[in-house]
Amino acid sequence: METVCDGEEPEVVTQACLLSEFSEKGEARALINSLPDIHHDPVSREATIEKFVVIMDRYQEQPHLLDPHLEWMLNILLEMIRNEKSPPLMVHLCFKFLYIISKVRGYKIFMQLFPHEVSDVLPVLDLLCRQDPKDTETWETRYILLLWLSMTCLIPFDLSRLDGHLSTDPGLNRESIMDRILAVAKSFLRVSDKSRDAASVLVSKFVTRPDVKLKRLGDFLDWCLTTISQTSEITMEGTVTLDGALQSLAQLFKHGKRDDFLQYAPTVLQCLNQKRIAESNQATLRKLGVKVVQRLGLTFLKPRLAKWRYQRGSRSLAVNLAQSSVTGSVEATKTDLESVSQEEDYDIPEDVENIIEQLLVGLKDKETIVRWSSAKGIGRVTGRLPKQLADEVVESVLECFSFQETDNAWHGGCLAFAELGRRGLLLPSRLSDVVPLIIRALTYDEKRGACSLGSNVRDAACYVCWAFARAYEPSELKPYVNQIASALVIATVFDRNITCRKAASVNILSPQGTFPHGIDIVTAADYFTVGNVNNCYLTISVYIAGFEEYTKPLIDHLVHMKVNHWDGVIRELATKALHNLTAQAPEYMANTVLPQLLPMATGMDLHRRHGAILACAEITHALYEIATQKNRDPVIAFLHPDLVFSCLFFSVCGLIEKLSLSKMPFKDDPVITGWQWLIDDSLKNLHLFSSGARRGIQDSALSALAALCRQYYQVEPGVANVEMQDQLVSQYLSALMSPEVLTRCGCALALGSLPPFMIRGKLQKILPGLQAACKVVQKAESQTEARRDAATAMSQVCVAVGVCAQGSPDRVLCEGNIRPVYEALLGCMNDYSMDSRGDVGAWVRAAAMSSLMDVTLLVVASAPELLSSDLVQRMMCCLVQQAAEKIDRYRAHAGTVFLRLLHSTDPAVPHIPHREELLSIFPPETGNSLNWNAASQAFPHITQLLRLHQYQYHTLLGLTVSVGGLTESTVRYSSQSLFEYLKGIQQDATVLQQFGDTLLCIFRDNLRNDRVSVPLLKMVDQILANGCFDHPFCVELLALCKEEIKKSKDVQKLLSCVAVFCGMVQFKGDVRQKVLVQLLMLLCHPFPVVSPLALVLCPRFNSDSIVSLGESDIATVRTHRNQLCDWLGLPRPILVTKVTHLGN
């Protein structure tokens, strides 16, 4: 952030996305020239096309920069196309490049560059006729050829001259050029690709030729109308055909001369009316219907400019600058609106009324493209009407703004007014009717189901403001400029939709300097700044409200439109904005706004009630802050007591917090009892709320409880009201034994949120209660969330009361109570509870890690002597174990806490084992650079702790579940790091034996603990496969494996154990004999564990006979198994008969 020095303004640096020239022309030329070399290779062809598209797409918004280069690109490509040696694949590739260029620059400009000599007509037509309309890969070729043919049709010669002796030689049976082109155009009007659009352009150029329209215009129009009448839109093919016919009609009536088409217009209109295009289900057809109808309307009306239209000065800058004064300019250029030329007195055809009615109906269409086309049609047709009829059209458009109409009608009406105003067809006398409607449209918002409608209406209303600002003189808009300015500012900062905020912001300077404080506002609320809705509500609005003209409009809009908004986020932002705006008008807030909010807080509408209560809370707190700053009595400064009490009846936790922070004089008032009941009820009944709302309600209640206690439960500073202290502490402690999990959670956190004076004197009751809540109790119901919040609350309580080594155990954390706190939190580090949600114990472990860090740093800062070496060692070992485990999020949390404690220097945490070695592995700079979430970064550091004796057990225990886990990346990087460590100690027998003993110790300690034992077996299998251990290690490992699978029915465990047995076959002597006995016994296990055994025995025995054992019954398998025992020289396993003892 820049600072201002010596009174100078900071330099403003902006980045523009504007381009100055076609800088990639060299690369584009190279790509085009490379086409002959790469067209046969699909990969190179795709890559070249992609590169060219990327280059051209950069100029989508500035296509004019391509103009100096279009000709040479076109010439190179056409030269390749005309080359007879060019294969078809390359020709199609060239046409694809031509299409890419035309798409960016626009076909209207690009097609003008095509060569259009007489000699080009037949080659282009012949090439087009050879194309397959059904080939989906070459539609670009057909599209460009149709555009090219459209240009060649403009040659100023009669096409019959190209037919040669066609008419005189009866032996030649071929079509004329005219008929061939028409046939091609008709065929491509029925295709489903973009060639259909180019075919309609061809029709507009070709049929309007003087020689063609004399012979074929009537026939072609008959063909179009017949196609429209006989084609059904039910099928996809019918829709495409109708689209082509309507496009050709629209293009013909647009480009043709009025005198040529006037005689056909009634027939075309009658056909469209009978077809009922406006009722079609296809939006594209409805849009084309509107386009044709408006062109028919322009055909019926004479092409003249309305003399009565409003004109704003000269469109020439030179003429305007030459005027002596503004008044003179206006008088010299403005037409007398009262005088109407006699030329306007001509009969308007009756069909025009039908056309205008269809356009007005189109303004209410459900699709934007139809409404937009209708609005443009309204503007075009109205410009040719007499003044009286044009005013009737305006009156009809005004009817779109009834509240009985849908958002579609409002949107269409805004678009129509923008077009009328832009063309000078909306006279200033009508502004008094139109401006209020546009202001209402700027805030139009209707809720429908789970979403709202109206963003398009508000965006279109901004467009109307833009059009009006450029259509009228400032003097015409002066009576309405304050209303428009306020509405636009409100839309700029408070609209929910980012598009509408940006559209409104660019209009702030539109009214040519008449916008109050326009430059200041647009500087603060520019196009990019308004992109962040939080910034708009909480920062920009405060700045704008500093201008008196906007203060009350902004506040009133929030109160009437946003406080009761259906979106909860907007309601909360609105209330926070009211808090910030209170400083601009405190008296208005207290005397006007709050009385308006109170009835809303008692209403039936849930959204309105919620917003009103939050708003009351925020405004009350803001008024208190203002009064405190001005050293005035917070109670009587702004608020009348009756106003406050009436609001309290409908208070919620947020209101309680704000009123408590505002230090309202309610101490010993009965209303405090009601507030406390509400908080307690919220905390004890969290299970009644939806899962999405629980956290917010809980946090709000806890904040309210803390604020309430600080303000109303202190007899004097630091001394609690004993009665309330006993009541609250005993109440929350008893709730820790509730069968409802969420009740335990809320009350545990309530104990943690109590102020220090409420805890002191009760610490010996609170800490044991929370410690008991942290213990895992084997019950049917999981209390995981309660244990998590109890661990969090324990650290909060400790931090609140502080540390004193020789203090009272009932008042501070001291020598007499610190060990139970650590024991409870370290116990939570071993919580691996599981339920249907997965490893929910991780929640408890994460909370315990955070609590251990908070408590440790607190103790170290005040009384480090309280930390014994055994507690610190256990804590650091537990953190190392968590940092080596498989869940990324909790591994990262543990790693962060571990490094925070290790790198703490002010003062340092005492008694950390191997501190120097740890700092060499984790130097201080790794605190920010090491990404614990990434297994590839974390495990190479973690495995280095295996060489530190006091960390080896816990590090290996954590690595066990990672190496033997399921996540591919975790298994890969953890096992890779482990084997690199083992590879490094292969030559050190002592260290290797110590590692093996630790591994066996972990196995013994976690026997039949499937969370550890199954991953451990998988890890041991990998270790044995790498040949890392010798004979003595496997003797005890075999005994532990036998004990682990004894009476087990876990298939996964059995398979893992069989894999370990197979790995131990490599050892000679008694181990191999015992392992083979176990494998042969497992051969008769009810579960299919034959395959690993077969893999071991296949090198020595017939694999077919071994594999077939899996398909036999147990008796057959047992017979073959005994035969194998004899071959191997092993004793046959004896089936033990179960003995049932009968009671007396």
Image (cartoon, rainbow, N blue to C red):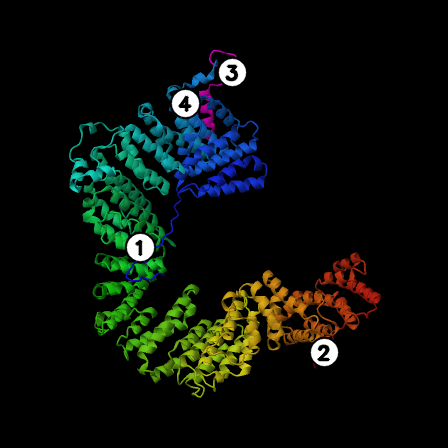
> Mark 3 or mark 2, which has the lower sequence index?
3
**Nearest to the observer: residue 1116 or residue 246:** 246
Q: Disc 2, disc 1: CB below 8 Å?
A: no
Q: Is residue 243 above or below residue 1039?
A: above
Kindly give the residue lying farthest to the front in the view shown. Answer: 6
* Disc number for residue 525: 1
The secondary element bearing badge 1 is classed as loop
The residue where tag 4 is placed is 155
Q: In which image quadrant can residue 64 be found?
A: top left
Magenta stretch?
166-190
Q: Position of residue 36 (x, y in %)?
A: 56, 34
Q: Is residue 165 above or below residue 51?
A: above
Foreground mark, 2 or 4?
Answer: 4
> Mark 1 or mark 4, which has the lower sequence index?
4
> Is residue 1072 visible in this depiction of the protein?
yes
Q: In which image quadrant can residue 333 be found?
A: top left
Q: CA distance from mark 3 to mark 4?
A: 26 Å
The residue where tag 3 is placed is 173
- Tell me the kind of residue under disc 2: His
Residue 878 among those drawn in magenta: no
- Tell me the kind of residue under disc 3: Asn
Foreground mark, 3 or 2?
Answer: 3
Q: Report the number of numbered marks.
A: 4
Foreground mark, 3 or 4?
Answer: 4
How many residues crowd mark 3 within 10 Å: few (<14), some (14–19), many (20+)?
A: few
Foreground mark, 3 or 1?
Answer: 1
- Tell me the kind of residue under disc 1: Ala
